Image (cartoon, grey):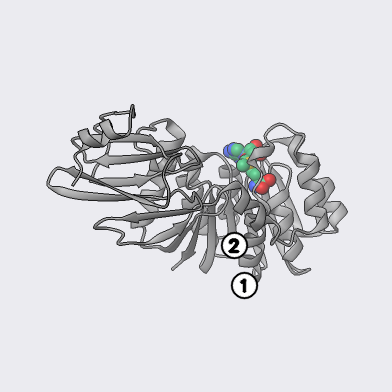
Amino acid sequence: MVSISSLLSRWGSPLLICSPHLSRPNLLLLPNNKYATFLLGSSERLVRVSSPIAHAKGGRHVWARNSNRLLRGYCCVEASVVAASDDNYGNKQVISVTPRLYDYLLTNVREPEILRELREETAGMRGSQMQVSPDQAQLLAMLVQILGAEKCIEVGVYTGYSSLAIALVLPESGRLVACERDAVCLEVAKRYYDRAGVSHKVDVKHGLAADVLRYMIQMGEACSYDFAFVDAEKRMYQEYFELLLQLVRVGGLIVIDNVLWHGRVANPLVMDSKTLSIRNFNRCLMEDKRVSISMVPIGDGMTICRKM
Ligand SMILES: C[S@@+](CC[C@H](N)C(=O)[O-])C[C@H]1O[C@@H](n2cnc3c(N)ncnc32)[C@H](O)[C@@H]1O
């Protein structure tokens, strides 16, 4: 076994931080091309160790004793694979998407021409990083198709990329209620709905999404929607979710974007209000027996919820 102090001396000048924020013993491996960072700790003590991995060949194991538990981390030089090995995870290996691997993945996405044009036009606009990725849009469209959805809701339209992906696969009789507070973005979205010939399927609601959803419930539309996608204000996620749970039928889906929040949700040292909101929301969803859930590491992380 290697003690933390000998680990530190062997790896040169790593970073050492103590924090009271972890609620249970934890081990995270966050490799990139140059460093591997390990968080080892408990509610009493968190140790973060970063080490250059430039000279490593193959994988290497690191042991550290935390309270009375032995934690073992496996640091992979091939950054496309993360492997964790401890009491919780066994020897499970999971893919970590590198830029090269993501480029490859995108060559396997069938992005309709009109969506590509919208994405390229939006690239020059403020906030273009907010748009869902082509692989996410493809997954949303597939979920809508699998469900045979006729009635959908989107919370957070921006310039319309995800809503257009959904509208394109809706049947002619289908309807998407698209909620957005920014009129300038909506002008771009509406232009593309027109160009794609799907304007008749999209009911644009300009205003605050929670108000629109409340109004829809008051108008007797509860339990009548098949699918909802949430991609707006992060601190409102719980509220959107509660309203959409009323609007969606049993067996319908609510898909929530940005649930991994650029990885910040997994870093106990990050405590800003948006990260806390999403972390709390994820924790509540875990315990929410009204839905079955699947958190998918696509884009910035999406959770698919099915109403029971
Ligand atoms: C992440 S972007 C949506 C991206 C979009 N789904 C796409 O793929 O292009 C979030 C959008 O939500 C809108 N938004 C934020 N808070 C809102 C609210 N309370 N009501 C309605 N729209 C809101 C923002 O104006 C922004 O355009």
Q: Nearer the viewer, residue 10 or 273?
A: 10
- Residue found 18% across the figure and 35% down from its top: 44
Q: CA distance from mark 1 to mark 2?
A: 11 Å
Using a 10 Å C-alpha cutoff, classify the residue at mark 1 as few (fewer than 14 neighbours), some (14 to 19) or many (20 or more): few
Q: Amino acid at mark 2?
A: Phe
**Where on the image, by quarter, is ligand 1?**
top right
The residue where tag 2 is placed is 227
Residue 219 sits above or below residue 206 on the image: below
- Residue found 62% across the figure and 72% down from its top: 146
Q: Nearer the viewer, residue 30 or 216?
A: 30
Measured as percent of width and height from the top left, residue 43 is found at: 21, 38
Measured as percent of width and height from the top left, residue 303 is found at: 49, 56
Measured as percent of width and height from the top left, residue 237 is found at: 49, 45
Using a 10 Å C-alpha cutoff, classify the residue at mark 2 as few (fewer than 14 neighbours), some (14 to 19) or many (20 or more): many
Q: Amino acid at mark 1?
A: Ile
Q: Nearer the viewer, residue 89 or 286?
A: 89
Quarter of the figure with the C terminus: bottom left
Contact flag, marks 1 and 2 (Cβ < 8 Å): no
The residue where tag 1 is placed is 146
- Residue found 25% across the figure and 29% down from its top: 18
Quadrant assignment, res 197: bottom right
